[in-house]
Image: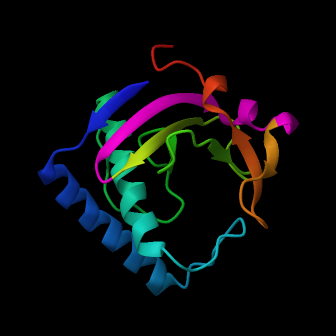
């Protein structure tokens, strides 16, 4: 695990990308996927951007900002996040088998990167279930993730 704290300047800059990302989806009529329902969309977009930025900072990669709908999150890796300290990494059937998926927990610019897993390895039936009713997915426990040093 590695803790990443974004600076206030990084949070402000990145949060604005989250606002732009949300507006992009509103303008496009973007449909919700994987059983997600309307509700905390602004929070999800902003926190999503912040956690992507945290992974980019850890990997010393450029984070492109708002991006386009369905772009890869950071360079060639995907980022999944949850505010829950013991949260699991969620992967969907439609996710790329050959992408690395990183799990980040935390909120408001203070994050822990727990590890990563290949999409194909995450898609193991032993991880299949519903963390929320109506939202089936592969839910990979933190102890099954690859070390950040591998």
148 is higher (above) or lower (below) than 117: above
- As drawn, is 39 to the left or to the right of 35? left
The residue that appears at 23% across and 43% down in the rendered structure is 6
73 is higher (above) or lower (below) than 23: above
Q: From this viewpoint, is residue 79 visible?
A: yes
The residue that appears at 44% across and 24% down in the rendered structure is 1
Please give the range of residues in magenta.
108-126
Q: Position of residue 128 (x, y in %)?
A: 82, 44
Name the residue at the left extreme. 9
Q: From this viewpoint, is residue 61 visible?
A: no
The residue that appears at 56% across and 39% down in the rendered structure is 86
Name the residue at the front extreme. 85
Q: Position of residue 143 (x, y in %)?
A: 63, 24
118 is higher (above) or lower (below) than 22: above
114 is higher (above) or lower (below) than 146: below
In reply to whether residue 18 is colored magenta, the answer given is no
- As drawn, is 133 to the left or to the right of 108? right
The residue nearer to you, when weighing 46 against 60, is: 46
């Amino acid at each position: 695990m590695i803790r990443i704290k974004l600076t206030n300047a990084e949070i402000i800059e990145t949060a604005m990308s989250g606002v732009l990302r949300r507006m992009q989806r509103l303008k496009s009529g973007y449909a919700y996927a994987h059983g997600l329902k309307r509700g905390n969309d602004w929070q999800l977009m902003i926190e999503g951007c912040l956690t992507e930025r945290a992974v980019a900072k850890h990997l010393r990669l450029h984070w492109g900002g708002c991006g386009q709908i369905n772009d890869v999150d950071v360079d060639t890796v995907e980022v999944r996040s949850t505010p829950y300290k013991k949260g699991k990494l969620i992967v969907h059937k439609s996710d790329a088998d050959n992408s690395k998926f990183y799990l980040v927990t935390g909120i408001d610019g203070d994050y822990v990167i727990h590890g990563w897993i290949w999409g194909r390895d995450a898609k193991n039936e032993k991880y299949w279930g519903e963390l929320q009713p109506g939202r089936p997915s592969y839910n990979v426990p933190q102890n099954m993730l690859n070390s950040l040093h591998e």
